[in-house]
Amino acid sequence: MTHLKIINGNATPEEIAAVVIALASRTIPQAKAVQKPKNWRNPAHYQRKPLPFGQGAWRSSGLPR
């Protein structure tokens, strides 16, 4: 916390304490966390996966990935 300096005025110690407490109690607003967009509407999810190729590809084409 930076130092507070009274330049002009006749503030009492109680008034200065009230100002210091009011300024010290201020909170910095937290930035909202950026939420990752939901991908359930992504059209790429409806596209077929690439088919396997090479030796034994026909066997692996029927197996779950």
Image: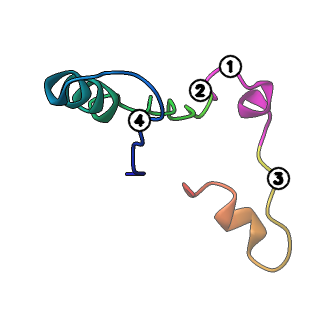
For numbered disc 3, what is the local secondary structure? Answer: loop
For numbered disc 1, what is the local secondary structure? Answer: loop
Give the residues in magenta. Answer: 39-48
* Callout in the foreground (2, 4): 4
Label 3 and label 4: CA atoms lie apart by 73 Å
Q: For mark 2, what is the residue? A: 38
- Label 3, residues with CA under 10 Å away: few <14, some 14-19, many ≥20: few
Label 4 and label 1: CA atoms lie apart by 59 Å
Q: Farthest residue in the bottom direction?
A: 55
Name the kind of residue labelled 4 in the image. Answer: Ile
* Callout in the foreground (2, 3): 2
- Location of the C terminus (image quadrant): bottom right
Label 3 and label 1: CA atoms lie apart by 20 Å
The residue positioned 35% from the left and 31% from the top of the image is 27
- Label 2, residues with CA under 10 Å away: few <14, some 14-19, many ≥20: few
Residue 10 on image: x %, y %: 32, 21
Q: For mark 4, what is the residue? A: 6
Front residue (pair 32, 14): 14
Name the kind of residue labelled 3 in the image. Answer: Pro
Q: For mark 1, what is the residue? A: 41
The residue positioned 20% from the left and 24% from the top of the image is 12
Q: Give the mark nearest the N terminus, 2 or 4.
A: 4
* Callout in the foreground (4, 1): 4
Q: Give the mark nearest the N terminus, 4 or 1.
A: 4
For numbered disc 4, what is the local secondary structure? Answer: loop
Q: For mark 3, what is the residue? A: 50
The residue positioned 81% from the left and 55% from the top of the image is 51
Residue 61 quadrant: bottom right
Q: Is residue 26 magenta?
A: no
